[in-house]
């Protein structure tokens, strides 16, 4: 089981702040594919992953990063500087 956390407009589109997901995905990209296949709201949230960032156990990662041993995956839009 992996805790999946959604922030900002990702959370708004999916309608959840977090959930536990039983996944066999080997990478973040494979997890995104599993989530997209669930329902239209997930497909909408993950339609353009170039507009998203991901963190694994609170550390920035790429979508090709492995999920082995990961406890938490967080999806969020890019942060802007100020």
Image (cartoon, helix red, strand yellow):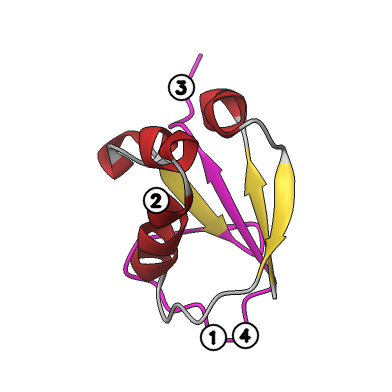
Front residue of 68 and 33: 33
Tell me how far mark 2 sits from mark 3, CA to CA. Answer: 26 Å
- Real-space Cα distance between discs 1 and 3? 30 Å
Q: Which residues are magenta?
A: 56-82
Q: Is residue 30 above or below residue 76?
A: below
Q: Nearer the viewer, mark 3 or mark 4?
A: 4
Instruction: Name which residue lies at 65% across and 57% down.
Output: 58
- Label 2 close to label 3 by CB (< 8 Å): no
User: Alpha carbon of mark 3 to alpha carbon of mark 4: how far?
Assistant: 30 Å
Picture coordinates of residue 52 (x, y %)?
Answer: 39, 39
Secondary structure of residue under mark 1: loop
Residue 18 falls inside the magenta stretch: no
Figure check: 34 above or below 5: below
Which is more foreground, mark 2 or mark 4?
2
- The residue positioned 66% from the left and 48% from the top of the image is 5
Q: Which residue is mark 3?
A: 80
Q: Quadrant of residue 31?
A: bottom left
Q: Are marks 1 and 3 in contact (CB under 8 Å)?
A: no
The residue to which callout 2 is attached is 36
CB atoms of marks 1 and 4 within 8 Å:
yes
- For marks 2 and 4 on the same chain, the one whose residue lies earlier in the sequence: 2
List the residue tagged with mark 4. Answer: 69
Q: Is residue 24 left or right of residue 74?
A: left
- Determine whether the residue tagged by mark 2 lies in a helix, strand or loop: helix
Q: Residue at x 55, y 75 (%)?
A: 23
Q: Secondary structure at mark 3?
A: loop
Q: Quadrant of residue 32?
A: bottom left
Label drawn at residue 68: 1
By secondary structure, the bulk of the magenta-drawn segment is best described as loop
Given this view, does label 1 or label 3 mark the residue nearer the observer? 1
Is residue 70 on the magenta stretch?
A: yes
Foreground label between 1 and 2: 2
């Amino acid at each position: 089981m992996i805790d999946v956390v959604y922030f900002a407009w990702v959370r708004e589109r999916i309608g959840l702040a977090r959930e536990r997901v039983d996944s066999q995905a080997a990478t973040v990209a494979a997890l995104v594919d599993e989530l997209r296949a669930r329902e239209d709201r997930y497909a909408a949230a993950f339609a353009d992953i170039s507009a998203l960032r991901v963190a694994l156990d609170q550390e920035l990662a790429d979508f090709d990063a492995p999920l082995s041993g990961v406890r938490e995956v967080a999806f969020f839009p890019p942060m802007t500087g100020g």
